[in-house]
Image (cartoon, helix red, strand yellow):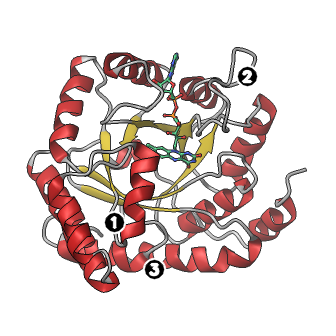
Amino acid sequence: MHVCDGFLSMRNRKMKEKIMIKVSEIIKENKPTLSFEVFPPKTEDKYEGVLSAAKQMSKLHPSFISVTYGAAGGTRAFTTNIAGDIASLGVPSLAHLTCVSSTKESVDEALAQYKTHGIENILALRGDLPEGVSDLGEDADFRHASDLTAYIKSHGDFCVGGACYPETHPEAENKNADILNIKKKVDAGCEFLTTQMFFENSIMYNYMYRLREAGVLVPICAGIMPITNANQVKRAIQLSGTVMPPRFLALVDKFGDKPEAMKQAGIAYATDQIIDLIANDVNHIHVYSMNKPEVAEAIVKNLSDIVVLK
Ligand code: FAD
């Protein structure tokens, strides 16, 4: 029995009518879309706070809201519940799921719970490896995200997405090998890809070209992280090894010690990136909104005539 199962069944009883739409339907046309992301609480007492952030974001009518997954799986019930609650708020939801620490049995259980909660969309990920581990190994039920993708596709009617890396996944042998692995994910049934955050659009345009050339033709959601405080910069570099363009670093140098100014500058930078992406026909934008509805709202306001949400 999962640690949060009692809480899960309690929320289950409160289920309202859900909005059940597949992300692949939402992004099938090349019209601009804007989606947000929340991460689940680590403990039950923080649940209402995360739900409140998701509620405020849902009032902005995003194309969908995604809910991340703790790689170790200990907060799975919270991912399920938040994603289920988002669907009840009238916004399509996307729940993440990782291979790390998953078995076929635990994935079967997760899929059954996602179904019960009206979740139609799953982002299938490997998850970051625990320290000192360099590969999940051949004996693992799911070694790569592509294995999990294939399993989910053959065990239920879910729309499955995956992650991709404009600056190459840090463990990949090289750029080309990484793209060939993305192709395997798509061949396994992945219907769309969301990128790791990036701060230099030219890197994304080059990546899109290479993906398309390798035959990866599914829609791509560009992952944009509005940096709203200087500490996030270090974390973003650690997480993704991303290139921070001098223009962005100048903002951090100038405003990093002035929280409100940094927030304004970070939101403006992200807005500028999004407008440039859409102007270049990269139309699906996923904002790493990090449980900050005020950031999501500022971005929506800045784009009010560029991305029409309803
Ligand atoms: P994979 O696609 O399995 O790739 C991992 C590495 O293995 C890559 O180097 C790839 O080139 C290589 N590889 C893939 N397939 C093969 C193959 N068949 N043979 C050989 N090599 C292969 N983490 C979480 O814990 N929870 C989350 O909710 C979460 N959400 C994320 C959302 C997005 C949009 C992104 C970009 C990342 C997210 N992550 C999350 C982080 C992610 O789990 C890590 O980046 C992880 O290290 C790789 O996951 P993946 O799904 O890309 O793995």
Among numbered discs 1 and 3, the one appearing first in the sequence: 3
Circle 1 is placed at which residue position?
227
Tag shown at residue 56: 3
Q: Secondary structure at mark 1?
A: loop
Amino acid type of the residue that numbered disc 3 sits on in the rendered structure:
Gln
Q: CA distance from mark 3 to mark 2?
A: 39 Å
Circle 2 is placed at which residue position?
140
Amino acid type of the residue that numbered disc 1 sits on in the rendered structure:
Ile
Mark 3 residue's CB less than 8 Å from ligand 1: no
Left or right of residue 2: residue 26 = left
Q: Position of residue 31 (x, y in %)?
A: 20, 51
Asked if disc 1 and disc 3 are in contact, CB closer than 8 Å, the reply is: no
Among numbered discs 3 and 2, the one appearing first in the sequence: 3
Q: Position of residue 296 (x, y in %)?
A: 35, 72
Q: Position of residue 52 (x, y in %)?
A: 55, 80
- Residue ranking furthest to the right: 1
Asked if residue 22 shows in the view, the reply is no
Q: Position of residue 113 (x, y in %)?
A: 73, 50
Q: Secondary structure at mark 2?
A: loop
Left or right of residue 304: residue 238 = right
Up the image or down, 45 lies above or below 124; here it is below
Residue visible at 58% across and 39% down?
Answer: 128
Among numbered discs 1 and 2, the one appearing first in the sequence: 2
Residue visible at 48% across and 25% down?
Answer: 189
